[in-house]
Image (cartoon, grey):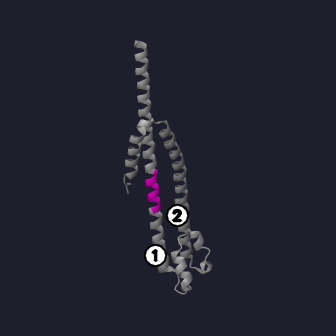
Amino acid sequence: MTNIISFHFALALICLLSCEKAGGEVESVAWEKHLLDCRMERLKAQNDSLWSEMTAWLDQNLPKDIPAAERKNMVSTQNAYLLKLFRVYPSLDTAIKARIRNMEEKDWQLVAEMRKIMERYRIVEHNLNQALEQAGEGELRGLKEKLDRIEAQACQR
């Protein structure tokens, strides 16, 4: 009888410890996912800011003799590669071309960083799903509430 009680106690302890481990793992992975979301949000804001500056700069520095429709399209284009495809690009001043090339480099750097984050994000989501699958049914509601609280956290600027 004592062996049966000891066995059940040990089984309950193992279950409790594995549930705590799964819960802690879920929370840890959820925080990593949240931090990746925040990094991506900051990169998008950085990209928007860079392009706002660039479009304002182009508006001020493009030659006034560029046809109005083409000038408007150039100023509103937020893609350095596409800017280089405009018919007037070859005739632009070297300073304007240099600024567009510089923006293209910044674009590539931001895209590369975003790709790294997205690759890591896929891994983290996979790990989160695996950790949730390991959690007991009774624990899922509490974990869902923790996940919702983590996702609701504002990103630090």
Q: Amino acid at mark 1?
A: Ala
User: Residue 146 placed where, x, y %?
Assistant: 38, 44
Label 1–label 2 contact, CB within 8 A: no
Left or right: residue 139 versus residue 86 is: left
Q: Hey, which quadrant is residue 104 in on the image? A: bottom right
Which residue does the image show at 55% across and 55% down from the upper left?
A: 115
Quarter in which the C terminus is drawn: bottom left
Q: Which residue is mark 1?
A: 56
- Give me the disc on residue 106: 2
The three-letter code of the residue at mark 2 reads Lys
Q: CA distance from mark 1 to mark 2?
A: 17 Å
Task: Name the residue: 56% across, 86% down.
Answer: 67
SS under mark 2: helix
Q: Position of residue 26 (x, y in %)?
A: 44, 40
Where are the magenta residues, as a range?
36-44
* Residue 100 drawn in magenta: no
Please tell me whether residue 150 is drawn above or below residue 50 in the rendered image: above
Residue 4, compared with residue 144, is above or below; it is: above
